[in-house]
Image (spheres, helix red, strand yellow):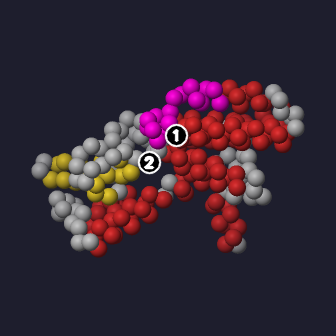
Amino acid sequence: MSFDVNNIRIVLALLMLGIASYTDIKKREVDDRLWMIFGGVAVVLLFITPNVVGSLTTIGISLIIAPVALFVWRIGFFGGADAFALIVLSALVPESTFSVSPVHPFTTLINTVILSITPVLVNVTRNIFAILRHEDIFKGFETETRKSKIIAMFVGHRSKNPKFSFSIEKREGNSRKLDFALKNADNEEFCSSADTWVTPGIPYMIYIFGGFVIQLVYGDVIFNVIKIMH
């Protein structure tokens, strides 16, 4: 019975994240009702679990991710929908995995952060190829320091026609300067200015979805890497 309920939980979690990722890509926002619906489902499933007390304990431990997710949201690292996704996920499928690797309340978040590094590799590759094509990607930024330019190559790229990206530059008089200030993901507007340095506005929900799938099939990436190294 518990195995069947666990499978139901996983299927519902994948459904929830699939819907959230799709709407985040299409509309760049997720309806809060999605979290209320699946949060309610998590409560209902609790009552058809054979060991209610044990499940409550596991969920309680998993929900220690909640204050962390809310804090990261408030400082602007990701949006409110991403925080709610992690919280509901903790209640719906606490520490679930098909792998033999142990997982913990922060496994999905850790896997998500690792996945979110992917755009950095893409940015660096794109900028290196642009330089090899003799493009002056820092034209107009002659007063910028070498350190700022190197950081820019990792976090963004110069786009002729930005789409679903955030600007990482600002004006200071007649000069153009790079701006790496952390902005709230819920309030920042997408850049629409041509020929601007931007950072990709990839929906973080996609990374959360991927981080959860990795948890299911592989477990905790950091834990497994450490285990391999030893």
On screen, 99 above or below 1? below
Quarter of image, res 14? top right
Task: Return the disc, 2 or 1, that comes first in the chain's sequence.
Answer: 1
Can residue 93 be seen here? The reply is: no
Residue lying at the far left of the rendered structure: 174
Picture mark count: 2
Going by the image, does 66 lie left or right of 178?
right
Identity, as a three-letter code, of the amino acid under mark 1: Tyr
Residue 26 in the magenta stretch? The answer is yes
Going by the image, does 1 lie left or right of 224?
right
Disc number for residue 22: 1
Mark pair 2, 1: CA separation: 12 Å
Nearer the observer: mark 2 or 1; the answer is 1
Q: Residue at x 29, y 73 (%)?
A: 132
Residue range (magenta): 23-38
In terms of secondary structure, where does tag 2 sit? loop
Q: Quadrant of the C terminus?
A: bottom right
Q: Residue at x 47, y 44 (%)?
A: 203
On screen, 19 above or below 111? above
Q: Residue at x 66, y 66 (%)?
A: 226
Identity, as a three-letter code, of the amino acid under mark 2: Ile
Residue 155 in the magenta stretch? The answer is no
Tell me where residue 102 appears, x and y as whole percent.
75, 55
Which residue is under mark 2? Answer: 202
